[in-house]
Amino acid sequence: MTKEKRVYEKVYTQEDLLDVEIFNIDMNILDKEWINQPKIFFRYASQLADARRRMEEVKAEADVVKAEIDLDIRSNPSNYNLEKTTEALISNLILQQEKYQKALAKIRIKKHKVDILQAAVTALEHRKSALERLVSLHGQNYFSTPKAPDNAGREIAEDIEKETARNLVGRKRRRRS
């Protein structure tokens, strides 16, 4: 397994990277979900900012590595079996150097983490929209259970009594005939 793959797997196994449970919404406690939304959003937006900063730092380190290799090639072209140096040749040689490849691998890993956190922040924005819509539906009694009016129980009981009485009268008449 290459070092890049090992580091990549570490990114995915970090517990602080992403807790997918934060995207679940309990409709029975919308008030608490609203109270927690800014805290959750801030936590992941901060992680995203930190990840972007670390990615920029790794990019700067890669630039230093590239400059060091460039200087070494120009100073010691014979170490690289070069008779003459051209910009294209130097650029291609830099890309082939293991040290530079490792620096690029670190950038890819940091960028992946930034992308995952950006997806989380975007999902939290969608979560906010979902909370807004759920609260709106709640205000329109969308989640309420059907209730009969207070006197409906009496009316239904009276209707049942009348129907039962009619049925009894109807049976008696049929028996007489």
Image (spheres, rainbow, N blue to C red):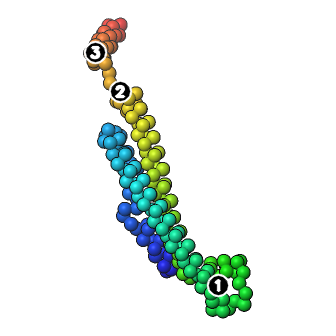
Say which of 142 and 32 sits in front: 32
Q: The disc labelled 1 sits on which kind of residue?
A: Arg
- Residue 167 % position (x, y): 33, 13
What residue lies at 62% left-to-right and 78% top-to-bottom?
95
Marking on residue 151: 3
Say which of 49 and 145 sits in front: 49
Q: CA distance from mark 2 to mark 3?
A: 15 Å
CB within 8 Å, label 1 to label 2: no
What residue lies at 42% left-to-right and 37% top-to-bottom?
132
Q: CA distance from mark 1 to mark 2?
A: 82 Å
Say which of 95 and 68 sits in front: 68
Q: Mark 2 sits on what residue?
A: 146
Which of disc 3 and disc 2 is earlier in sequence?
2
Q: CA distance from mark 3 to mark 1?
A: 96 Å
Quadrant hosting residue 145: top left
Q: The disc labelled 3 sits on which kind of residue?
A: Asn
Seen in the picture, residue 9 relative to 127 is either above or below; the reply is: below
Badge 1: how crowded within 10 Å, few (<14), some, or many (20+)?
A: some
Say which of 112 and 5 sits in front: 112
Q: Quadrant of the C terminus?
A: top left
Marking on residue 102: none
Q: Residue furthest front?
A: 75
> Element at badge 1?
helix
Q: Mark 1 sits on what residue?
A: 74
